[in-house]
């Protein structure tokens, strides 16, 4: 298994649109179509495909969040057909290496649904520390999440 990250562009966006989480995970991450539309119209959003050789197995979106202010890994998903194969761990490590090589020793934030203990444990294994609990409402749905932060010097 050779994991790489590739920018989403006109050559591979359709593969990204075909990726999906398991039904019980859909409440945890926005659909990739929504993320790609956001990236098309909002500056400082960077969509990446997660590949095993030539097959896209997942998706990641990172951005500069002016509300924090700071860099955030705002979307991270592995397609339901490819879960349980170690792609998430490898892709997260690859992204962290890429991110810190590109941006230096700046903090990186992410958030996770309070009810998504699997993702929270994964992030914590890679050095993210839970900072706070917060809630927000979007399209009349209220989401409850933890904000996590990682610095380049933290393990992972």
Image (cartoon, rainbow, N blue to C red):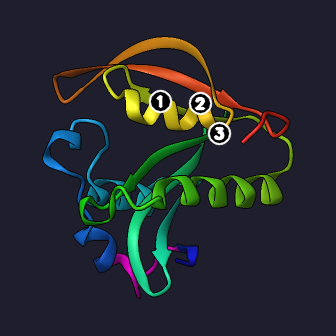
Q: Secondary structure at mark 1?
A: helix
Q: Is residue 31 left or right of residue 59?
A: left
Q: Main secondary structure of the magenta part?
A: loop
The Cα atoms of the two marked residues, 2 and 1, are separated by 6 Å
The Cα atoms of the two marked residues, 1 and 3, are separated by 10 Å
Q: Nearer the viewer, residue 13 or 69?
A: 13
Q: Is residue 76 visible?
A: yes
Tag 1 residue: 120
User: Residue 5 falls in which quadrant of the image?
Assistant: bottom right
The residue that appears at 38% across and 53% down in the rendered structure is 77
Magenta span includes 12? yes
Badge 3: few (under 14), some or many (20 or more) residues near its Cα, within 10 Å? some
Tag 3 residue: 126
Q: Which residues are magenta?
A: 7-13
Q: Is residue 126 left or right of residue 135?
A: right
User: Residue 137 falls in which quadrant of the image?
Assistant: top left
CB under 8 Å between discs 2 and 3: yes
Q: Which mark is residue 54?
A: none
Q: Residue pushed farthest top?
A: 133
Earlier residue among tags 1 and 3: 1
Badge 2: few (under 14), some or many (20 or more) residues near its Cα, within 10 Å? some
The residue that appears at 43% across and 29% down in the rendered structure is 112
Magenta span includes 41? no
Q: Is residue 96 left or right of residue 48?
A: right
On screen, 67 above or below 126?
A: above
Q: Nearer the viewer, residue 29 or 23?
A: 23
Tag 2 residue: 124
Q: Secondary structure at mark 3?
A: loop
CB under 8 Å between discs 2 and 1: yes
């Amino acid at each position: 298994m050779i994991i790489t990250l590739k920018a989403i562009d006109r050559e591979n966006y359709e593969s990204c649109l075909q990726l999906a989480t398991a039904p019980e995970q859909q409440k945890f991450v926005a659909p990739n179509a929504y993320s790609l539309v956001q990236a098309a119209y909002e500056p400082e959003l960077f969509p990446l495909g997660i590949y095993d050789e030539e097959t896209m197995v997942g998706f990641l979106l990172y951005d500069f969040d002016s509300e924090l202010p700071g860099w955030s890994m705002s979307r991270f998903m592995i397609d339901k057909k490819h879960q349980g194969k170690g792609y998430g761990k490898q892709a997260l490590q690859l992204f962290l290496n890429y991110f810190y090589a590109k941006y230096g020793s700046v903090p990186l934030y992410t958030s996770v649904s309070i009810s998504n203990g699997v993702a929270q444990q994964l992030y914590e294994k890679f050095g993210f520390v839970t900072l706070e609990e917060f809630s927000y409402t979007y399209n009349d749905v209220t989401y409850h999440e933890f904000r996590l932060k990682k610095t380049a010097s933290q393990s992972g």
